Image: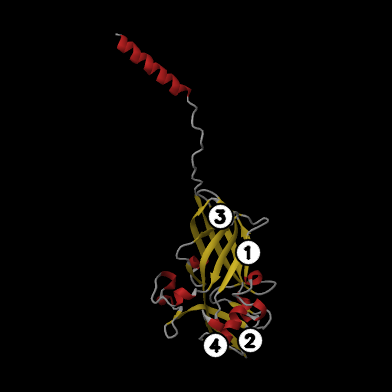
């Protein structure tokens, strides 16, 4: 009996000590979750009173006076990443998007699984980086079947604009295929769009933040000649670079304020 009593007493003491131990109050990690961002591209053409730009619609250049009707307008947006308020980035994998004015579904880009946070910038590239230009046959928006690749030149057409223009009341054809990814004729351009003031990009769990951007291709002709003077480019070179980058960074690829303008963030 003594043995039993001692055992019970010892167990009682152990239980008492366990009950007196302080509970662990160390906070556990909480998964804040993820959200999405959608980017809508609204194409307009002009300077003050921009016209809606669509395939087969007629626009007039505000400086050159050229009357143009586009049958094709395509370009690449690539290497998209979003910068958090803490300075770190969320980067999209395989980030290559072919924007095609004839395909409405391509005018809205959706980025999923961004960590919940406030974001201050969207960084992206207009054109295709040099690595992918020399990587051979590829798939998706980089597939050669999208008619945006020069097989003879082993490189991507970064922007393609085709259609007709009026010359003495007659319709004439224009075709601008702009490319070049290295050396003096490189037109690949990195861009940054800043979110501040009333346009804070706040990604919340399970929700989609919406960004609206107005795209204005008039700057292709801001520094380049009238389409009546120059109406065809089919290879990298000084003419293609002038259309893409312009004089003093006032080209369609180079100028942030007038060619890609942030309208709203919701």
Which residue position holds label 3? Answer: 209
Image quadrant where one finds the N terminus: top left
Which residue position holds label 1? Answer: 262
Q: Quadrant of residue 227?
A: bottom right
User: Does residue 117 appear left or right of residue 105 in this picture?
Assistant: right
Secondary structure of residue under mark 2 = loop
C-alpha separation, residue under disc 4 versus residue under disc 2:
11 Å
Q: Residue furthest right?
A: 48
Q: Tell me if label 2 and label 1 are in contact, CB under 8 Å.
A: no
Which circle's residue, 3 or 4, is located before the other in the chain? 3
Q: Residues within 10 Å of mark 4 (few under 14, many from 20)?
A: some
* Residue drawn 68% across the image and 71% down it: 49
> x, y (%) of residue 236?
52, 84
Which residue position holds label 2? Answer: 226
Q: Is residue 6 visible?
A: yes
Count of residue discs: 4
Which residue position holds label 4? Answer: 232
Of residues 42 and 257, the one nearer the viewer is 257
Q: Quadrant of residue 5?
A: top left
C-alpha separation, residue under disc 3 versus residue under disc 4:
40 Å
Q: Tell me if label 1 and label 3 are in contact, CB under 8 Å.
A: no
Secondary structure of residue under mark 3 = strand
Task: Judge whether 223 appears above or below 33 on screen.
Answer: below
Of residues 185 and 113, the one nearer the viewer is 185
Image quadrant where one finds the C terminus: bottom right
C-alpha separation, residue under disc 3 versus residue under disc 2:
40 Å
Q: Residues within 10 Å of mark 3 (few under 14, many from 20)?
A: some
> x, y (%) of residue 93?
46, 63
C-alpha separation, residue under disc 1 versus residue under disc 3:
14 Å
Q: Which mark is residue 84?
A: none
Q: Residues within 10 Å of mark 1 (few under 14, many from 20)?
A: some
Which circle's residue, 4 or 2, is located before the other in the chain? 2
């Amino acid at each position: 009996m003594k043995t039993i009593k001692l055992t019970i007493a010892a167990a009682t003491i152990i239980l008492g000590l366990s009950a007196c131990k302080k509970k662990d109050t160390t906070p556990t990690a909480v998964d804040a979750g993820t959200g999405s961002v959608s980017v809508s591209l609204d194409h307009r053409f002009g300077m003050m009173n921009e016209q809606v730009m669509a395939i087969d619609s007629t626009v007039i250049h505000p400086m050159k006076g050229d009357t143009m009707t586009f049958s094709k307008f395509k370009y690449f947006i690539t290497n998209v990443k979003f910068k958090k308020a803490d300075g770190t980035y969320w980067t999209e994998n395989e980030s290559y998007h072919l924007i095609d004015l004839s395909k409405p579904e391509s005018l809205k880009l959706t980025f999923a699984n961004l960590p919940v946070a406030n974001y201050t910038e969207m960084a992206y590239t207009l054109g295709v980086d040099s690595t992918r230009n020399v990587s051979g046959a590829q798939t998706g928006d980089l597939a050669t079947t999208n008619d945006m690749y020069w097989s003879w030149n082993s490189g991507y057409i970064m922007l393609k604009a085709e259609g007709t223009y009026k010359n003495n009341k007659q319709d004439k054809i224009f075709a601008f295929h702009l490319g070049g990814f290295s050396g003096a004729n490189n037109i690949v351009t990195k861009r940054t769009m800043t979110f501040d003031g009333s346009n804070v990009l706040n990604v919340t769990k399970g929700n989609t933040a919406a960004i609206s951007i107005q795209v204005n291709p008039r700057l292709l002709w801001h520094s380049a000649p009238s389409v009546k003077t120059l109406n065809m480019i089919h290879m990298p070179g000084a003419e293609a670079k002038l259309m893409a980058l312009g004089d003093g960074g006032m080209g369609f690829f180079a100028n942030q304020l007038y060619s890609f303008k942030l309208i709203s963030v919701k």
